[in-house]
Amino acid sequence: MNKILSIIFTALYFIGLTISPTKSAQADELFTWGDNALGQLGYVTTGLQTTPAPVTGQNGILSVAAGNSHTVFLKSDRIVYAMGDNTFGQIGNATTAQAVIPVSTGLTGAVMVAAGSFQSFALKADGTVWGWGQNTSGELGIATSANALVPTQATGINNIVAIAAGGNHTLALRADGTVWATGQNDAGQLGDGTTTARANFAQVPGITGAAAISAGGKFSLALLSDGSVLGWGNNSALQVASTTANVLTPTKITGGASSISAGLNFALARLSDGTVVSWGDNSFGQLGQGTTSATPSGTPAKVSFSTLIKLIAAGGGHALAVSADGRLFAWGSNASGQVGDGSQTNSATPVEIGFLAGGDVIGIAAGAAHSAAFIAAGSGTAAGGTTSRAVGFVNQTSTTGITGATTTT
């Protein structure tokens, strides 16, 4: 278990989830940017934002995740908060009313959060998983297909150390290194060799020694303790194999990895040497390899970085990364300003988002078309601003529900 936790807390898994072990100090201010049509940036207003901006009053951030059009985060009080679209109850406040500012879910004792397309999750310190929001495919793992407007405990699983939420399916990693899955399975994303949906978590056959997980739009990834990356599910963009047929059971994609992140139809892996590889859909330049192509790539290839990377997050059609020295980079689709460079122009190569000079970014999240992040307490000076009192920065991941989360403990 110690080995598993060691790897987990150096990995990020997208659809989401990002975990940073680099700081034990409390993180501070939450920043968001990109699409804001449903209030997912938490600004009160709903106009899009092309550069990172702080969410008023939201400090002490420990974990953040971004879904299709909502954002979920965990604060130092161990309470989970959310904002944005609430059509299916994904905000978790017992209503379906849109929330343009953060509201409390009332869930306490959490250690990390994750967000899918229209569903949200929290992992509690006791190893239990709690979910809320859309559940039409059984993605909450609560043994029914009814939506949940408040956090509801998943049944049949315990000793969970990580969760990852995809389009309409969910993965959970147990302390024993096994992977469990529930929800939609039309493309084989549950990895059980069938295409039959489930409303309860069941073990993914054939996986032992897993150290991290990530859920994409309709595909799944697992990182093993030996650095192998396994994938299964939808393969329309070659995101899990070199041929276009869907993959119904876990299959090795590559090796030498230390963290993974699944986006809508593409994926990232950070290698043990600090470089990053990508594969899958590249319609918007989200592979970060300097080109844009309607033809996907099933072969992991290096993202065009000139620096070593410690965190990665894949979203709907864009991606985020944090360098070893704490700087934020982004690339891919930018129609809603989700890259954060002040434009709405796509970028096929990573660009540094320099709004925070000298900051140590420790959490990122990439949603369908919005982003979030936060930095270590006491670090950084906002570009054009003054030194942050105890903190200041932001980000995390998700996509089409692909979601990502970031955690510091």
Image: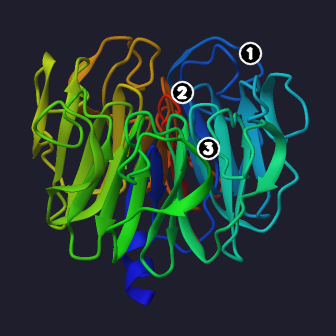
Residue receiving disc 1: 45
Left or right: 60 as drawn, with respect to 321: right
Coordinates of residue 389 in the picture (x, y in percent):
66, 54
**Which is closer to the viewer, label 3 or label 2?**
3
| Residue drawn at (11%, 26%) of the image | 290
Coordinates of residue 156 in the picture (x, y in percent):
68, 67
Work out whether residue 388 or residue 307 is closer to the camera in this orientation and state it.
Answer: 307
Counting every numbered tag in the picture gives: 3
Residue 139 is marked as 3
Work out whether residue 157 or residue 302 is closer to the camera in this orientation and state it.
Answer: 157
Work out whether residue 351 or residue 370 is closer to the camera in this orientation and state it.
Answer: 370
In the depicted structure, whether residue 384 falls above or below residue 179: above
**Which is closer to the viewer, label 3 or label 1?**
3
Coordinates of residue 353 in the picture (x, y in percent):
36, 34
In the depicted structure, whether residue 326 falls above or below residue 91: below
Q: Earlier in the sequence, mark 3 or mark 2?
A: 2
